[in-house]
Amino acid sequence: MNRCRREPNSAAERRENKAHGASRGYAWAGTGILPAPDAAGTGETPAPPNLLPSSPGLSRSGPVRSSLSAVSALALLIFAACRDATPPALPGVSDTAERGPLKLVVRAEPTELWVGDSFTVTVEMKTPEEFEVELPGSAELSGLTVREMQTPDPRPLPEGGKLWRRTFRVDTFVSGTLEIPPLVVKYRRNAAASQPAESNEIAAGTLKVEVRSALTTQDSVQAPRDITATLLPPPRRWTWWEWSLLGGALLAAVAAALLLVRWLRLRALRPPPPILPEVWAMRCLKELEAAGLVERGEARDYYYRLTEIVRAYVERKFALAAPEKTTEEFLTLISRDRGRLPYEADKLRAFLEACDMVKYAALQPRREDADAALQTARAFVNATAAAAERQVQPPIGPAARGAAA
């Protein structure tokens, strides 16, 4: 079990320890024990006692030497941390001119650049409060291309006075050494000062900036090398929201295509709009006329098809089962309900009986008779269609107009 040395708490304990140390050849100095001078006058200083308890296999000098090394390393670290760090030098060249309390600093940075790049020229003037300053303009940078000039308001300094500043941005188009001419600053005391206002000047020296060229020693301005390849910018990576928009647009396009295909299929399967019976009948009569059955000696087929067209028209238009009935049955049905078919029964009877003579009695009609039968069928269709239309929409007479009013 290790023991620790206890510090003396009272003055009496400190005096006792001091006397005890003096009797063994040691003296107190502050809070540490220092070796006392040799009483015999030999000049030798006795070695300090080992304050730590001895243990087998451990020398007396090992712990003390380790403690001193640790303390020395700690002191060096504290000393290194407490030293003032030297500020890094600015990457530029500057020149300073002083006159009494006035101080002019002209700085150019960077000092080395590639042709086509730009550098900055800064003019700073420190003056007392009672001075006014006129900083140089871009015209005084003769031979240089000034792109931009900035002049902030004068600001007060912590130690007193003002700081005047103007910054120039200069472009470079020619390689080599560029010289910044001496810049002159005019100053005078303001009207509120006790001394009279006199205009004076202060100037800084010439500054140099090195402009490098991208050409090598093997290049020539008169004979430039050919372009070997085109340097393209790296492709821009799409963001997540751009991919989301693209995916949404593709889904919308696919959905629109599916809807269009479905609509086209439904439209193809949809039955065509119904044709009016009179339009259908007129179309069939025109096709029958163009068939030329009478000229080919097929008058019987011509009349068969003519009566079938008329009967089918009556069935479609007036819902009468005309194709399934004979001529007598059909005429008897019409005579029972004359208002159902708005046409003269005698004309219809004469037309049907004339057709039956050709169909069943083997009568050979003339061309004029066939054309007359066709015209009769057309007149029948037109007359009955117009009559049916008038029945659906009766004309409005004066009495009807008065009732409506």
Image (tube, helix red, strand yellow):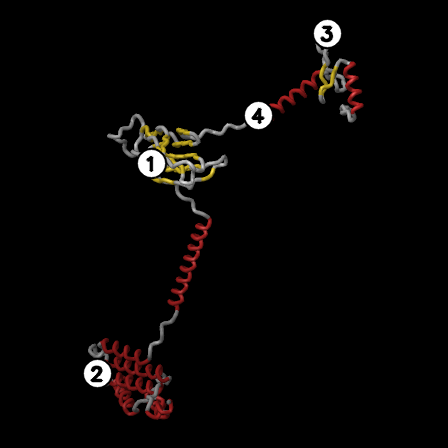
Q: Which element carries disc 2, helix, strand or loop?
A: helix
Q: Which element carries disc 4, helix, strand or loop?
A: helix
Whether the residues at callouts 3 and 1 have beta carbons within 8 Å, the answer is no
Q: Which residue is mark 3?
A: 41
Give the mark, 4 or 3, whose residue is nearer the N terminus: 3
Dot 4 crowding, Cα within 10 Å, few <14, some 14–19, many 20+:
few
Q: Which residue is mark 2?
A: 371
Q: Position of residue 278 (x, y in %)?
A: 31, 81
Q: Nearer the viewer, residue 343 or 190?
A: 190
Q: CA distance from mark 4 to mark 2?
A: 130 Å
Q: Is residue 263 left or right of residue 30?
A: left
Q: Which residue is mark 4?
A: 80
Q: Position of residue 32 (x, y in %)?
A: 71, 20
How many marks are shown on the rendered structure?
A: 4
Kindly identify the amino acid type of the residue bearing the numbered disc 3: Gly
Give the mark, 4 or 1, whose residue is nearer the N terminus: 4
Quarter that holds the C terminus? bottom left
Give the mark, 3 or 2, whose residue is nearer the N terminus: 3
Q: Which residue is mark 1?
A: 171
Q: Nearer the viewer, residue 325 or 2?
A: 2
Dot 1 crowding, Cα within 10 Å, few <14, some 14–19, many 20+:
some
